[in-house]
Amino acid sequence: MKLSHDIPLTPIDEALEILRTSVPRITGSELVTLADACGRVLTEKLVASANVPSHANSAMDGYAVCTRDLVGEPIKLKVVQRIVAGQVGKPLSEGEAARIFTGAPLPEGANAVVIQENCSLDGDQVEILKMVEPGENLRKVGEDIQAGEILLEAGHRLRPQDIGLAASTGLTQLLVQRKLTVAVMTTGDELVRPGVELKDGQIYNSNYFMLSALLRILNAEVIELGVVEDDLVSTMQALEEAASLADCIVSTGGVSVGEEDHVKTAVEAVGGLELWKLAIKPGKPFASGKVRDT
């Protein structure tokens, strides 16, 4: 479909809506490691495969006790072991306590932890200065996450905290939407790659590096088409090549009405134009369309 040159300028909000409705959604999924998953979009529900925590553990530094032993005046228990995070203690017998630290598994026979500020140690005897209730100062099995719980829905864009959540359940990979592939095409006989000595009339191709950096922030896979010469045939060939490689083509330059602006004409020749000229300055000579289904 060709547009006449006298078509009214399109307001920016209307143009954005046209772009949103005309661009097809990508399909396909891939497994990625947690290290590569941030910013990607889940394609299936994230379901917890394990309880977090997987075992009852102490929420405080103190002494693991059985509340049935907290009788009499004064209340004194024999300290028979020391348990730190990562260790598994031995079962407690009647009248015994265990020195325990935050995150350490609760030993069998204990049902509460008395914080160290409410205890007084004398040799291997600990005096309990304040009573506790069963379950006090503990993290129970599955208190944070229960096995089978839906943690995140499909379609969720993963944030750093989501990666930590997945790791806490033991996952190493996530199924996410494949990356959008974007072919970036710059036009202009005057453009050269940075690092090359400039000749008279030349400028560095800064637009490609800016656009590719912006696209990579969005987790797009960038395909560099290089600089396309300012002629219609080369532009048409570049567009057709890009359409065979990518989901989307982004070009810069060549969409105004100058004699060397060939992109708009090339799109109309090998595809169709859906949008041209915005009611905004700078940026009025903006065009959008399709080459094949791209």
Image (tube, helix red, strand yellow):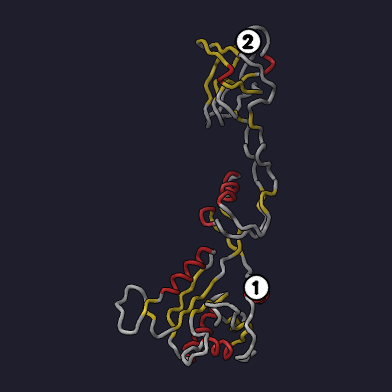
Q: Is residue 276 above or below residue 82?
A: below
Dot 2, how many residues are within 10 Å of its Cα: few (below 14), some (14-19), or many (20+)?
some
Sequence-wise, which precedes: disc 1 or disc 2? 1
- Report the side of 1 relative to 240 (left or right): right
Quick one: 251 or 182, which is closer to the camera? 251
Determine the image quadrant of residue 100: top right
Q: Which residue is mark 1?
A: 13
Q: Is residue 188 above or below residue 80?
A: below
Tag of residue 42? none
Q: Quadrant of the N terminus?
A: bottom right
Residue 169 at what x, y percent from top left? 61, 44
Residue 10 at what x, y percent from top left? 64, 80
Residue 72 at what x, y percent from top left? 67, 7
Q: Which residue is mark 2?
A: 75
Residue under the image location 60 percent in, 29 percent down: 59
Q: Quadrant of the C terminus?
A: bottom right
Residue under the image location 66 percent in, 34 percent down: 141
